[in-house]
Image: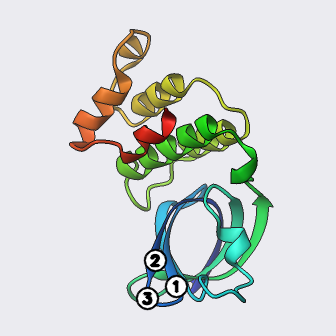
Amino acid sequence: MASRTYKTEGIIIKRINYGEADKILTVFTREHGKVAVLAKGIRKLTSRKKGNLELFNRSLLYIARGKALDIIAETEIIDFFPQNEVGFEKLGKIYYLAEVIDRLVPEKVPERKIYEMFTNFIKNEKNLNDILKEILVHLGFIDNARKNTNFDVENFIENLIERKISSKKMMG
């Protein structure tokens, strides 16, 4: 029988308001891949978890298994992402990459290599196209030979997911 709780390291890549005080978070974790979890009471002013669960923070999460959604019980910050201290262009690229990961990486499939690429990109911004090509190779959408060619990566991804990447407009 599976344990009722688990601990994992993850980066918050999406947040949606739920009810009056809660949020549903999409967390890209090292061990469990992309998971949706419920953060109860996070929208209350008195929430102790609020600061640890901001977008792009890397946190250690203690999660209780729930019927519909797993629930965050406790959090510890590993790396704080100071959104107000990075440039708008870098922030736009991180939003873009997070949206691509959310669209391309299946739920509950561990993708450690992509997790490491994303973590490194947040810390030390590299060429976005190179990272996107690496992700496409890793997930099997293109081969290494195509990775080394010059093609419109953004258009390729939008055709793949059959929709526009909404955070693209943030990149300027």
- Residue 68 place in picture, x, y as percent: 38, 85
Taking 109 as reference, is 75 left or right?
right
Are discs 3 and 2 less than 8 Å apart at CB? yes
Judged from the image, the secondary structure of the residue bearing numbered disc 2 is strand
Residue drawn 76% across the image and 47% down it: 85
Report the Cα–Cα distance between label 3 and label 2. 7 Å
What's the residue type where badge 2 is placed?
Answer: Asn
10 Å crowding of disc 1: few (<14), some (14-19), many (20+): some
Give residue 51's mark. Answer: none
Are discs 1 and 3 less than 8 Å apart at CB? yes
Are discs 2 and 1 less than 8 Å apart at CB? yes
The residue indicated by pointer 1 is 22
Residue drawn 64% across the image and 26% down it: 126
Report the Cα–Cα distance between label 1 and label 3. 6 Å
Taking 58 as reference, is 18 left or right?
left
Vertical placement of residue 124 versus 83, above or below: above
Judged from the image, the secondary structure of the residue bearing numbered disc 1 is strand
Q: Quadrant of residue 62?
A: bottom right
What's the residue type where badge 3 is placed?
Answer: Gly
Res. 113 in view: no
Vertical placement of residue 120 versus 115, above or below: above
What's the residue type where badge 1 is placed?
Answer: Asp
The residue indicated by pointer 2 is 17
Vertical placement of residue 140 versus 42, above or below: above
10 Å crowding of disc 2: few (<14), some (14-19), many (20+): some
Protein image colouring: rainbow
User: Which of the two discs, 2 and 1, labels the residue nearer the N terminus?
Assistant: 2
The residue indicated by pointer 3 is 19
Report the Cα–Cα distance between label 2 and label 1. 6 Å
Vertical placement of residue 16 versus 127, above or below: below
